[in-house]
Structure formats: C-alpha cells, structure tokens
Image (cartoon, rainbow, N blue to C red):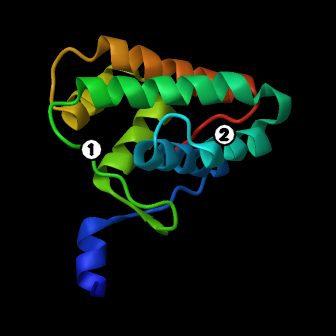
Amino acid sequence: MSAIATLAALPHALPDCPNGRTALFAMRRIGGHGLTDARAAHALFTAFGEGFRRPLTLVRGLMADMAAAAAGPISIAPCCCARMTHAEAALLTILARVEVYPETARLLLADLLGIRAVDGVLASAAAVAVAFADEGRPITA
C-alpha cells in the first residue's frame, strides 16, 4: 500500500494518552477477534492489574452494543497499525468527552453509528470511560 493510500485509510495518529492506546488496542482486538479475545483481556490485565475485570467487561459490552446498533460497518485497523481510522479516532474522542461534554459525545456517536437513538450505546461508552477513570487511567484526547 502506498503512503498516500495508507494516510487516506488511516488519517489519524495514535493517541498520546497511554490509556487511550490501551483502550484502542482492546477495541481493535475485540472488534477483529471477538468478545472473548485473550490478548484484549491480557492487555487490560497488564494495565489494570487485579481491577481488570470491570474495564474488560465494559469494553466487551460497548463493542457488542456498537455492533448491534450500527447502521453500517465501523472501520477498525489491525492492532499493529501505528495510525487510526476516522471511526477509531471518533470513538476515542467519545470516550474522552462523554463525562464532561455528553452532548458532543452523543453527536459524535450518532455520526459514527449512523443512527439517531444512541442512548444505550452512549451509556456503555460512559461506563467504559468511568471504569478507566476509577482505576486511575482516564482516557484523554
């Protein structure tokens, strides 16, 4: 793939926030390999230690909710990619803003999913953001 094609498909740099990178890795693994992916579980165990179960369960729930609610496909890159898709960047922005700017997060999520009624998925996103923050690992944009 040429550099121009790569930049078109993956226009965003990875987040500077290490917690955002952890969330992105887990979402990529779960999105690409299923809800029970062991590498996603290991990544969250490594990041959170004994408190990994809550963030893992909530990330799994968010991914399942998004897959069920989305009007079309949501593009995710393989785990090894050093850049992000528009959808991944939007999702990390949603997780970073959902607690402080819920209306902005709602609009971004509606655009991402292609639907208007996003309250259930937004609640899942808020739960993920709170779980990361409660463990001292807030996701920032």
Q: Position of residue 126 (x, y in %)?
A: 49, 20
Asked which quadrant contains residue 110, the reply is: top left
Of badges 1 and 2, nearer the viewer stands: 2
Residue at 31% in and 12% down: 119
Amino acid bearing label 1: Ile
Quadrant of the drawing holding the N terminus? bottom left
Q: Position of residue 11 (x, y in %)?
A: 32, 66
Q: Secondary structure at mark 1?
A: loop
| Residue with the most extreme right position | 50
**Front-lying residue, 88 or 141:** 88
Disc 1 target residue: 74
Earlier sequence position, callout 1 versus callout 2: 2
**Any part of residue 51 in sight:** yes
**Front-lying residue, 72 or 19:** 72
Q: Secondary structure at mark 2?
A: helix
**Any part of residue 100 in sight:** no
Residue at 20% in and 14% down: 117
**Front-lying residue, 115 or 63:** 63
For residue 116, side relative to residue 52 (left or right)? left
Q: How many marks?
A: 2
Disc 2 target residue: 41
Q: Residues within 10 Å of mark 1 (few under 14, many from 20)?
A: some
Amino acid bearing label 2: Ala
For residue 35, side relative to residue 66 (left or right)? right
Residue at 66% in and 51% down: 18
Q: Position of residue 74 (x, y in %)?
A: 26, 44
For residue 115, side relative to residue 59 (left or right)? left
Q: Residues within 10 Å of mark 2 (few under 14, many from 20)?
A: many
Q: Position of residue 58 (x, y in %)?
A: 55, 23
